[in-house]
Image (cartoon, grey):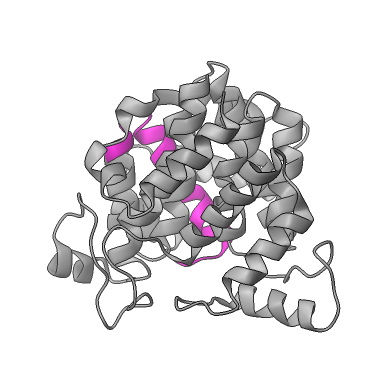
Amino acid sequence: MSDNKKAAVLASFAADSLALGAHWIYDVEEIVNRFGRVTTLEKPGSDSYHPRRDKGEFTHYGDQMLVLLTSVAERKAFDLENFSRRWRQLFEDYDGYVDGATKKTLGYYAKGKTAENAGSHTGDFAGAARMAPLVGLYGDDADRLAEVARAQARMTHDDPNTLDTAEFFARVTAAVLKGESPRAAVERLAASEAFEMTPVAMWVEEGLKSGNEESVAAIGKFGRACETPQVFPGVIHLIAKYETDLREALIQAVMGGGDSAARGSMTGMVLAAHLGMDAIPREWTDGMKKIREILSLLDRIVG
């Protein structure tokens, strides 16, 4: 299980880095025209949302995920106050994109709110999608993983859909680490008492029904924007359709356009928990600028 925990975290970072060049390009034909089929790490254009980033770096999601990994490695636990402090420090002189949820949360901190209640009410999927570092420490404890996944999301995205999303994929990943297939875990948990009467069950059904559709078209049907109701079914589609092919799943996540970083990070976490290290293309991990730092931090939390 230890190697697959590490793989889940690495794949989430790799997915974010793979998405960087085309992130938030909503016109899928433009992605093809600029990059072709995105199979390698790409440098974003000067007209992108990440003009100061280079090939092998991360979007603002990946940068926050690294803050979470650093905090967890330092404390050997999820410590909300430590994560909050490090997260705010990241944005003190940040030269990357600052999204709406971040601006709102920082504004609430400035008004005297705390890590417990400063989260924006933004319903973006990204608040859940950065959770992978928690798998490294809590992947063998589904209840605790679900609890801390919700807590880290709530710090910036205090929205019921985002919080349920964090818990759902935490429980899916924990089940996969214990040997259940991703699709089986998704179906079982969506039908469980905790989720059967929530939007999660509907999004799972939508994603599974699209299995025979071409992925870019399916993602476009669900929506390419950042909001959880649009991203969630696309993640389910990718997990189910490419259950044994992480590489293709993450390529399709990028080619689907829009918020490909959040879509890919969650997909990569779940599939790598199933398939392990060998499923992650070495050129992606080797090409990440901070791979040595990430591996060192992972060694501190995964036995």
Toward the viewer: 183 or 70?
Answer: 70
Q: Quadrant of residue 254?
A: bottom left
Q: x, y (%) of residue 113?
A: 85, 74
Toward the viewer: 150 or 54?
Answer: 54
Magenta span of residues: 225-247
Q: Which residue sits at x=39%, y=24%?
A: 275
Q: x, y (%) of residue 48?
A: 32, 78
Provide the major secondary structure of the magenta segment: helix
Number of numbered discs on residues: 0
Left or right of residue 35: residue 197: right
Q: In this view, does 49 lie above or below 59?
A: below
Looking at the rendering, in which quadrant would you find the C terminus? top right
Q: Quadrant of residue 73?
A: top right
Q: In which quarter of the image is residue 25?
A: bottom left
- Residue 134 makes an appearance in the image: yes
Q: Which residue sits at x=70%, y=26%?
A: 141
